């Protein structure tokens, strides 16, 4: 037994012919009633019956016409800040829980899948309404009809498969499971992120937008949304292309373990198995420097770390050793070291306690020997000293070779204006730009626009974005471990340019810290190229519970989306006509048969090629653990200040 009735909505509306016949019946009965003297009562019954059948068939014909004409699609629509605010704060948006408005559209069901496969057998344009009808629809709805617009991109019939549309809402609670936005260039991804960001700002969330391109309209939209929501003072801008008007953000301020800082910088080095040994060595150098800086009370920064990498760590090691001896040994430890030096015949200069003290505090080799021979056997050890000593005693030629990939990265992040942006100096009173860090911005409930200017320098953009994501992961871990009632929307556009291993951890575990993650990419191969592994890319993709797909041209990405959407049964109607003849001269010399068969087969909910035909600002999404929706988005038209 079929659970779903087979339909052919694109057929000729034969009901219209029946309605016309019944209309003629009504006219004929009216004429006979008017020109004859027959009793009125039979005409009333017959006329009412004919009129009822006429209306019934006309309504059925209208449903077919309406569905066909809806294939003309929808054109570009706009929404003001006030209208968008009303969407978020409406009763429908607040029903059960806070919800975000996802534009207009409909829930996608197997019926729509059936219609897709049926319409692929024909030319959708033959069903588009006449231009006069389209003009009337435009006048009535106030919106352009897609097929009537010369600049229209994509197939308008996709959104018209339902015939009608409604307001689409998705509960914010369901977005905590991370959302992936996929779409090719210039299909409307940034406008979608802009819409989500403005609603999050209106609802009072901390919003952090990382945009490798540094899209100026997106930045302006965030600023306008803050003004609309009365949060102008919450807006903070960080943009590599405009350092003079940018806030200074320290990406090394927040960490759970000192080794996190070394990992944060070492992760910027080229990956792959061939360079893993260089990256591991660089991590050891960075970790030793960070431990030494923290041991002496020096704040780690990219500029200071670069200085130690370029000029050597002897001075840092000396300060760490002297501080350790002053804190852990007896006040007369210098005399003890001097005696140790005379025993080894290493002391130089005049004999005498005062001269010996000066010599002791200037001889790094002597202090290291004393530490290893006399202090370690006593059970007193210092991790920073030993880590720095290992680097200090390393062969200088081999050391330079192993950090050859680290030096240019640190140079890029600390040269020119970028050095002051990423390594803010609190002692520089001449620099009046705001100085902050991501944890402080979250606690202050800020709206942060981060532009990385990737078009000018992709390498620096990728490095800075990766460090900021690593910093945010540490912040999320601190909130998760030590508590904090924070609501954060983290939006990453062009995510394939900045994502890293810490970001995967954030997707996997940051929901408990109040983070809602939204990432936008163009293709899955972009992620695979970033991680240098398709398996790693799939690991990241596996952490997204919600998937929003706009127009996609890449087949690998199309297959991933259709795989996520799943499959459903599609019915196929077959008509078979057959004739046969025999040599016998009987009445059955010629025979014929007509058969009609309906079969079903398991097919993709959405054929992959349809994803490549989605118009701009339109999407199909799987949200809330399996709900499929087809929607279209408006463009926000901000009022000029």
Image (spheres, grey):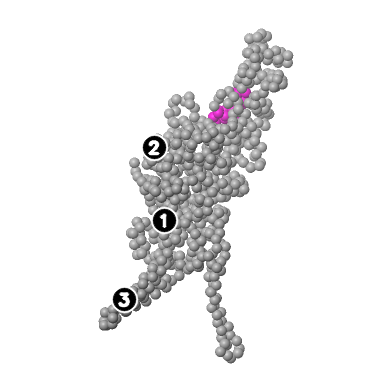
Residue sitting nearer the eye, 94 or 159: 94
Say whether disc 2 or disc 1 marks the residue closer to the N-terminus.
1
The residue positioned farthest toward the top in the image shown: 352
Q: Quadrant of residue 62?
A: bottom left
Q: Which residue is mark 2?
A: 232
Report the quarter where the N terminus lies.
bottom right
* Of the two numbered discs 2 and 1 in the rendering, the one whose residue sits closer to the viewer: 1
Q: Quadrant of residue 510?
A: top right
- Queried whether the magenta region covers residue 312, the answer comes back as yes
Per the picture, the main secondary structure of the magenta-coloured stretch is helix
Q: Are marks 1 and 3 in contact (CB under 8 Å)?
A: no
Q: Position of residue 512 (x, y in %)?
A: 53, 40
Q: Are marks 2 and 1 in contact (CB under 8 Å)?
A: no
What's the CA distance linking mark 2 and mark 1?
33 Å
- Going 42% across and 42% down the picture, which residue do you hit? 203
Q: Which residue is mark 3?
A: 44
- Queried whether the magenta region covers residue 404, the answer comes back as no
Q: Which residue is mark 1?
A: 166
- Taking the image as shown, residue 258 lies to the left or right of residue 378, namely left
Say whether disc 3 or disc 2 marks the residue closer to the N-terminus.
3
- Going 45% across and 48% down the picture, which residue do you hit? 96
Q: In the rendered view, tell whether residue 20 sits above or below residue 76.
A: below
Q: In the rendered view, tell whether residue 31 sits above or below residue 350.
A: below
**What segment is highlighted magenta in the picture?**
300-317
Q: Position of residue 463 (x, y in %)?
A: 54, 38
């Amino acid at each position: 037994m079929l659970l779903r009735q087979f339909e052919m909505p694109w057929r000729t509306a034969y009901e219209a012919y029946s309605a016309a016949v019944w209309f003629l019946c009504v006219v004929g009965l009216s004429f006979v009633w008017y020109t004859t003297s027959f009793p009125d009562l039979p005409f009333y019954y017959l006329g009412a019956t004919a009129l009822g059948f006429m209306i019934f068939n006309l309504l059925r014909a209208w449903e077919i016409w309406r569905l066909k004409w809806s294939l003309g699609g929808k054109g570009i629509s706009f929404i003001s800040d006030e209208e968008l605010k009303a969407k978020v704060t409406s009763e429908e948006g607040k029903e059960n829980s806070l919800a975000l408005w996802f534009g207009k559209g409909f829930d996608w069901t197997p019926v729509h899948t059936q219609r897709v496969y049926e319409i692929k057998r024909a030319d959708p344009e033959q069903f588009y309404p006449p231009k006069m009808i389209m003009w009337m629809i435009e006048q009535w709805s106030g919106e352009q009809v897609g097929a009537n617009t010369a600049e229209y991109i994509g197939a308008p019939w996709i959104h018209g498969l339902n015939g009608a549309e409604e307001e689409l809402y998705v509960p914010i609670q369901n977005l905590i499971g991370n959302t992936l936005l996929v779409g090719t260039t210039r299909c409307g991804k940034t406008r979608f992120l802009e819409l989500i960001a403005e609603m999050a700002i209106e609802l009072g969330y901390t919003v952090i937008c990382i945009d490798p391109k540094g899209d100026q309209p997106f930045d302006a939209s965030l600023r306008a949304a803050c003004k609309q929501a009365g949060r102008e003072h919450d807006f903070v801008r960080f943009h590599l292309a405009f350092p003079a008007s940018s806030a200074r953000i320290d990406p090394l301020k927040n960490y759970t373990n000192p080794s996190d800082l070394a990992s944060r910088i070492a992760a910027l080095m080229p990956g792959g198995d061939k360079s893993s040994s260089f990256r591991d060595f660089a991590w050891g150098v960075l970790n030793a420097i960070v431990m030494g800086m923290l041991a002496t009370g020096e704040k780690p920064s990219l500029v200071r770390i670069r200085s130690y990498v370029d000029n050597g760590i002897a001075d840092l090691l000396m300060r760490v050793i002297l501080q350790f001896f002053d804190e852990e040994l007896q006040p007369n430890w210098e005399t003890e070291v001097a005696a140790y030096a005379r025993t080894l015949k290493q002391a130089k200069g005049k004999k005498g306690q005062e001269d010996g003290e000066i010599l002791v505090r200037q001889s790094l080799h002597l202090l290291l020997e004393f530490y290893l021979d006399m202090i370690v056997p006593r059970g007193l050890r210092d991790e920073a000293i030993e880590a720095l000593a290992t680097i200090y005693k390393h062969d200088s030629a081999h050391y330079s070779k192993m950090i050859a990939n680290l030096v240019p990265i640190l140079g890029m992040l600390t040269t020119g204006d970028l050095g002051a942006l990423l390594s803010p100096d609190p002692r520089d009173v001449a620099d009046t730009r705001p100085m902050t860090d991501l944890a402080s911005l979250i606690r202050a409930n800020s709206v942060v626009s981060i532009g990385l200017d990737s078009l000018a320098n992709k390498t620096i953009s990728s490095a800075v974005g990766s460090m900021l994501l690593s910093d945010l992961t540490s912040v999320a871990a601190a909130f998760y471990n030590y508590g904090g009632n924070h609501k954060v929307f983290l939006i990453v556009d062009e995510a394939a340019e900045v994502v890293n291993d810490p970001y995967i951890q954030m997707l996997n575990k940051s929901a408990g810290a109040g983070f809602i993650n939204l990432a936008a990419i163009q293709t899955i191969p972009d992620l695979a190229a970033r991680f240098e592994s398709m398996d790693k890319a799939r690991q990241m993709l596996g952490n997204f519970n919600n998937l929003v797909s706009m127009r996609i041209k890449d087949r690998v990405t199309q297959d991933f989306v259709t795989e996520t959407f799943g499959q459903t049964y599609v019915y196929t109607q077959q008509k078979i006509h057959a004739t046969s003849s025999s040599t016998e001269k009987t009445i059955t010399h010629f025979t014929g048969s007509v058969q009609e068969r309906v079969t079903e087969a398991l097919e993709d909910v959405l054929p992959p090629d349809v994803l490549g035909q989605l118009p701009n600002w339109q999407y199909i999404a799987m949200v809330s653990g399996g709900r499929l929706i087809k929607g279209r988005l408006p463009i926000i038209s901000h009022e000029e200040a």
